[in-house]
Image (cartoon, grey):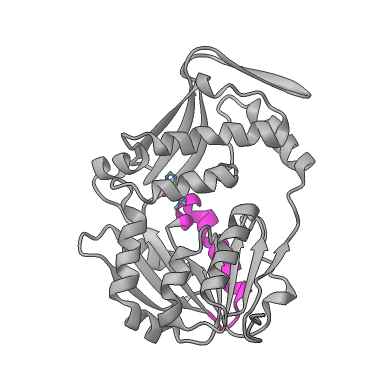
């Protein structure tokens, strides 16, 4: 009988503070009764939403993922020199874990901690990754870190490199982004942060990335309604809603909305809301930064010794920063 080598590890998995459905559904009901409801982008990520986002990252129009990957690839040695090796790599919003995995050989972490709200998707990704890296201790955390970044003891107390790629920081307005980054810093005392951020660029390029002709981003956005129906017992009819995405120059952000086509109505156990044609629900912001402004944001959150890497089109930036 073939025996498993003693050094082959099993990924550990923890689900933390599973979302309080009652609290969340009260919040949702309240929002749905506003003139212009807004729904937190975290609800885009059920298991299907995570798959649809993965499909988005393969679109020609969606430049962030491949531009960031090219920066990682091109500057892997400089990144490793800046960040050091042998730390606990904490991947915030790990998704399919591909970005972190691409840096394992350069960063040589001693431990990999993958955090994501989309628990089932993460669990599968992590088990596949563990099979490919049998010697690297891995821990999966099912956690909504938009509320808290309290990491459990299982993460260990080794030096940490926080990893927040993909410009997910773009979901936060500047003030909230600063606050979030402060929490990241507090979660890794004496450690570092490696973060990707999408940059300001011509509007046509931005809008095409968030409203692709194949309709994958539209499906990703509209899937939120399916997720809400499953979580909260709303009865959104997906056919009543269309995807809207545009660049808001005053706020320097892409906005995604769902717009009622004809009169739409949604009912839930304790209420209902009617929408006139053209009424919208705001589902996501994706802020676009100037490199200097983002450096200022990192500093205002208490980070120092900043380094940055930018692609030749100046579409995307990767920063290393230390607490
Ligand atoms: C995962 C938040 C980085 O803002 O580009 C992609 C999400 N939304 N297409 C982004 C997203 C529509 C993405 N982030």
| Number of numbered discs visible in the structure rendering | 0
Q: Nearer the viewer, residue 107 or 195?
A: 107
Q: Residue furthest left?
A: 312
Looking at the image, which residue is at 64% across and 80% down? 2
Looking at the image, which residue is at 55% across and 65% down? 128
Residue 247, how many percent across, how many down? 34, 39
Question: Can you say whether 73 is above or below 252 in the image?
Answer: below
| Res 117 quadrant in image | bottom right
Based on the picture, tell me whether residue 175 belongs to the magenta stretch: yes
| Res 136 quadrant in image | bottom right
Q: Nearer the viewer, residue 58 or 178?
A: 58
Q: Is residue 289 visible?
A: no
Question: Can you say whether 231 is above or below 92 in the image?
Answer: above
Q: Nearer the viewer, residue 5 or 178?
A: 5
Residue 170, how many percent across, how many down? 45, 53
Which SS does the magenta portion mostly show? Answer: helix
Q: Residue furthest front?
A: 1
Residue 103, how many percent across, how many down? 42, 75
Question: Can you say whether 260 is above or below 93 in the image?
Answer: above
Looking at the image, which residue is at 31% across and 39% down? 207
Looking at the image, which residue is at 47% across and 56% down? 168
Range of residues picked out in magenta: 168-191
| Res 3 quadrant in image | bottom right
Q: Is residue 230 visible?
A: yes
Residue 295, how many percent across, how many down? 38, 68
Q: Nearer the viewer, residue 177 or 19?
A: 19
Q: Is residue 96 left or right of residue 113?
A: left
Name the quadrant of the N terminus.
bottom right
């Amino acid at each position: 009988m073939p025996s498993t080598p003693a050094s082959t590890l099993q990924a550990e998995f923890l689900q933390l503070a599973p979302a309080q459905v009652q609290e969340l559904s009260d919040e949702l009901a309240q929002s749905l009764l506003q003139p212009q409801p807004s729904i937190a982008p975290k609800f885009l990520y059920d298991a299907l939403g995570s798959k649809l986002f993965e499909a988005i990252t393969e679109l020609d129009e969606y430049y962030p993922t491949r531009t960031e990957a090219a920066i990682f690839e091109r500057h892997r040695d400089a990144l490793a020199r800046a960040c050091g090796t042998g730390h606990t790599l904490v991947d915030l919003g790990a998704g399919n874990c591909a970005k972190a995995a691409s840096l394992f050989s350069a960063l040589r972490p001693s431990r990999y901690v993958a955090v994501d709200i989309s628990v089932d998707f993460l669990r599968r990704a992590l088990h596949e990754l563990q099979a490919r890296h049998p010697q690297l201790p891995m821990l999966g955390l099912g956690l909504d870190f938009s509320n808290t970044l309290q990491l459990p003891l299982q993460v260990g107390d080794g030096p940490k490199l926080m990893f927040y790629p993909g410009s997910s920081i773009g979901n936060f307005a500047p003030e909230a982004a600063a606050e979030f980054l402060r929490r990241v810093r507090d979660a890794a005392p004496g450690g570092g942060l490696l973060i990707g951020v999408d940059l300001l660029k011509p509007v046509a390029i931005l809008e095409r990335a968030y409203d692709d002709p194949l309709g994958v981003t539209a499906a990703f956005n509209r899937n939120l309604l399916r997720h809400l129906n499953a979580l909260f017992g709303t009865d959104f009819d997906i056919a009543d809603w269309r995807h809207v995405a545009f660049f808001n120059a005053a706020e320097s952000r892409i906005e995604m909305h769902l717009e009622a086509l004809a009169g739409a109505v949604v009912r839930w156990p304790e209420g209902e809301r009617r929408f006139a044609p053209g009424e919208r629900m705001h589902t996501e912001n994706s802020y676009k930064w100037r490199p200097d402004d983002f450096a200022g944001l990192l500093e205002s959150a208490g980070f120092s010794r900043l380094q940055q890497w930018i692609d030749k089109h100046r579409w995307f930036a990767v920063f290393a920063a230390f607490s």
